[in-house]
Amino acid sequence: MNLLARKLLKVPLLMSEVIKPNPPAGCAFLIYHSVAGNLNFELDLPVALFRRQLEFLARHNCVISYDEALRVLRAKRQARADAVVLTFDDGFVNFYTHVFPILREFNLPATLFVTTGFVETGIPYPLLHHTSGAEIKPVTWEMLGEMVSSGLVTIGAHTHTHVYLDNEPEDKVIEELAIPQELFRQRLGIEIRHFAYPKALWNPAVEKLVAKYYASSVIGGGYKATPDGFNPYRIPRVPIRCSDGWFFFLAKKRGWLAGEEALYVKVRQKANSKLQKASVTAWIGK
C-alpha cells in the first residue's frame, strides 16, 4: 500500500471518530520505531517531522514518563487530557543518533524497548517485509549506557530475537523473556521492568508468563490508556507512522484513529495464524 493510499484510508476512520462530542480521555502511549527518513517503510519518520512533533509536545508540556503514567493509572486517577508517553521499539542506532539528541534538546523522557539479540551481536536488523531491502544497525551497549545515565531514557525489553510470542512454545517464550533481563544486568547493571510484544502479538497464556518477569507490558490498540479497568499488562499504544504527517499525528495524539490500528492488528494476527511470520533466528546465530 503506497503513501497516498494509506493517507486516504485514514480519512473515513478519522471521520467516524471526530463526530463524537469530545476526544477520548486518558493518556496516549505513542509508539515510534525508526527516525531517519531515508528508508522505504511506514515506520521510518523523517527527522524534521519527528522534531516538529516533539517540539510541539514540549511546548504544550504534554509528555510524562512511562513510570509516572503507570503510577497515575494504577491509582485510578485521570491523567491530564493532553498527556502522552513516548515509547520506541527495537533499538535502531538512529534512536541514538537522531532521537536522543532531540529528547535532550527538549528535556523529554522516553522509553526504549530493546531487542537484545541484535545489540549483543551487532548484526543489523533485516527489514524483511519492505521493498527497500534495507538493514538498520542496532544501538550498542555503550550507547544504551550513556542514554540510561542521562535520566531521560528508560529501557524495556522487546524479546531477545524479535519472535512473535503468540505462536511459540512455553519454553521459547520464557527464554525470550528472561534473556533480556539477564543481559541488562550483566552489561549495564540495571533491572528492566517493562515489556513490549513484537508486532503487538500476544495471547492470555503468554501474558501470564510476561507477568512473572515484568511489571507491565504494552500492546497495540491505537487508543488511549484510561484508569477505568486499567490493566498494566494490556497498556494500549498509538503507533505514529510516516503517512500520518502532521495532521494525522495531531489526531492520534488526541486519541482518534484507533480504528486504523485495530485494522492493522487484525491483519497481523491473520498472517501470523497462517505461520507467515519472519524468523530472525539465523541472523543472530541461534
Image (cartoon, helix red, strand yellow):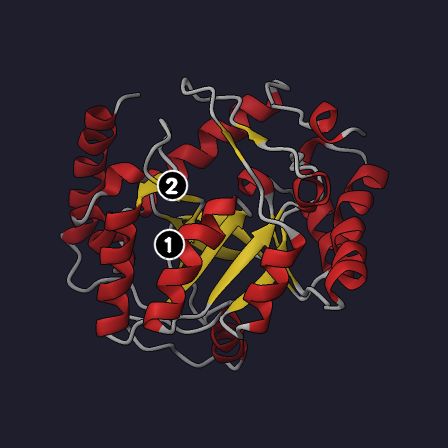
Q: Is residue 63 above or below residue 17?
A: below
Residue at the spot 67% in from the left edge and 24% down from the top edge: 279
**The C terminus, quarter of image:** top right
Q: In the picture provided, is 93 more to the left or to the right than 187?
A: left
**Tag 1 near tag 2, CB within 8 Å:** yes
Q: Name the residue under label 1.
A: 223
Q: For mark 2, give the secondary structure.
A: helix
Image quadrant in which you'd find residue 195:
bottom right
Rounded to the nearest angstrom, the CA distance separating label 1 from label 2 is: 8 Å
Q: Is residue 42 above or below residue 151?
A: above
Q: In this view, does 33 lie above or below 164?
A: below
Looking at the image, which is closer to me, 257 or 121?
121
Q: In the picture provided, is 27 more to the left or to the right than 11?
A: right
Tag 1: amino acid: Tyr
Of the residues under marks 1 and 2, which one precedes in the sequence?
1
Tag 2: amino acid: Glu
Q: In the picture provided, is 23 more to the left or to the right than 146?
A: left
Image quadrant in which you'd find residue 15:
top left
The label shown at residue 118 is none
Q: In the picture provided, is 226 more to the left or to the right than 185?
A: left
Q: Name the residue under label 2.
A: 261
Looking at the image, which is closer to me, 278 or 14?
278
